[in-house]
Amino acid sequence: MARVLSIASSDSGGGAGIQADLKAFARCGAHGMTAIVALTAQNTLGVTSIAEQSPDFVRDQIRAVLDDIGADAVKTGMLFSSAIIEAVADELTGRGLPLVVDPVLVASSGSRLLLPEAVATLTGLLFPLATVVTPNLPEAQALTGLDTEDRAVLAQRLVEMGAGAALVTGGHGAIPADHLFDGRTHLTIPVPRHEVAATHGAGCTHSAALAAGLAAGLPLADAARRASAIASDAVANGLADIGKGDGPVHVLYCLRGDDPPAPPGMGGLRPPISPPRGDGAEGAPPPALR
Ligand SMILES: Nc1ncnc2c1ncn2[C@@H]1O[C@H](COP(=O)(O)OP(=O)(O)OP(=O)(O)O)[C@@H](O)[C@H]1O
Ligand SMILES: Cc1ncc(COP(=O)(O)O)c(N)n1
């Protein structure tokens, strides 16, 4: 089983961050592991407080995971401060692991998730280690300082800034498409936009699925296509009724909560996944993983 480590922060509301990453890893059939750098008190309306962990404790979590279990890929999400980024970069340097850097700057609800002074640390220390960076459109504009919606231009500049490749995601702006540039080739991945009030965690889900794809050995372009399909699907099935704000995406929509009780003799375990009921209630099948 592919092993993927997320170095990111907790969302108490269960929609984004570490919680979204673990669900996306499960969706991709990967073993998910975590190094939590900050805890957020958060719901669908916003972030009310943030408790940063010490850089040493972040190092301990990364070492505990990598020195025993190992990983086939790593992703980073909300890293909050320069001190945390320095510790993360130091721990990952020399390990040679595929790395997806999701440069989370601001929550969709508006709160800052990376301190302003840490932006230069992120680009200076983590971009050179990144196999691919995955900003959304506003993040790509803020990181490059370019005032354009042309994702190809933005992705090219992000690679010039040191990233191995750049994938500018498609949830914002006029054109609904993810755009990947790997330093040589441009690839536009159209993502039909779903009008659902449940996009909280779409970016985390996308970057986690991308990391799981790389961990499984997929080429970057294939992993990017699969991550787009998984994130778009999770938006389409998003949980608009959860919370008073923008609801969480639902990446595990294919699992229903109404499975029958465990049959006798199964030690409390349910069968893996119930067969479709055939009445249409189970929704569309998930996209093929390969
Ligand atoms: N409304 C939508 N319909 C379909 N796919 C979407 C929608 N919004 C986002 N996506 C897809 O989800 C992924 C994440 O994109 P997006 O640009 O929204 O990132 P983000 O802004 O970081 O997400 P978040 O909402 O977590 O902040 C991309 O593959 C994108 O194309
Ligand atoms: C812990 C954490 N990590 C990432 C995000 C970004 O997700 P979104 O842009 O959907 O708010 C978040 N809100 N919280």
Image (cartoon, rainbow, N blue to C red):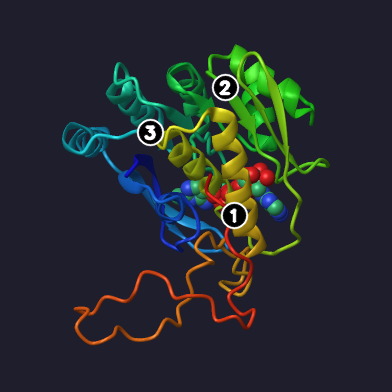
Residue 103 place in picture, x, y as percent: 53, 34
Residue under the point 37% across and 41% down: 6
The residue most toward the right is 174
State which tag comes first along the sequence, 1 or 3. Answer: 3
Characterize the local packing of mark 2: few (<14), some (14-19) or many (20 or more) Cα atoms within 10 angstroms.
many
Cα separation between marks 2 and 1 = 25 Å
Characterize the local packing of mark 1: few (<14), some (14-19) or many (20 or more) Cα atoms within 10 angstroms.
few
Cα separation between marks 1 and 3 = 22 Å
Ligand 1 within 8 angstroms of badge 3 C-beta: no
Q: Which residue type does callout 1 highlight?
A: Pro
- Which residue, given by chain and number where applicable, does mark 1 sit on? 287
Q: Which residue type does callout 3 highlight?
A: Ala
Question: SS at mark 3?
Answer: strand
Q: Which residue type does callout 2 highlight?
A: Ala
User: In screen coordinates, is 207 left or right of 69?
Assistant: right
Residue 237 place in picture, x, y as percent: 62, 65
For discs 2 and 1, the disc positioned in front in the rendered view: 1
Residue under the point 43% across and 56% down: 23
User: Image height check: is 119 above or below 93?
Assistant: below
The N terminus sits in image quarter: top left
Discs 2, 3 touching: Cβ within 8 Å: no
Checking the image for residue 73, the label placed there is 3
- Which residue, given by chain and number where applicable, does mark 2 sit on? 165
User: In screen coordinates, is 60 left or right of 77?
Assistant: left
Ligand 1 within 8 angstroms of badge 1 C-beta: no
Residue under the point 41% across and 61% down: 12
Residue 3 place in picture, x, y as percent: 32, 41
Residue 157 place in picture, x, y as percent: 66, 17
Residue 145 in view (yes/no): no
User: Image height check: is 124 above or below 212?
Assistant: above
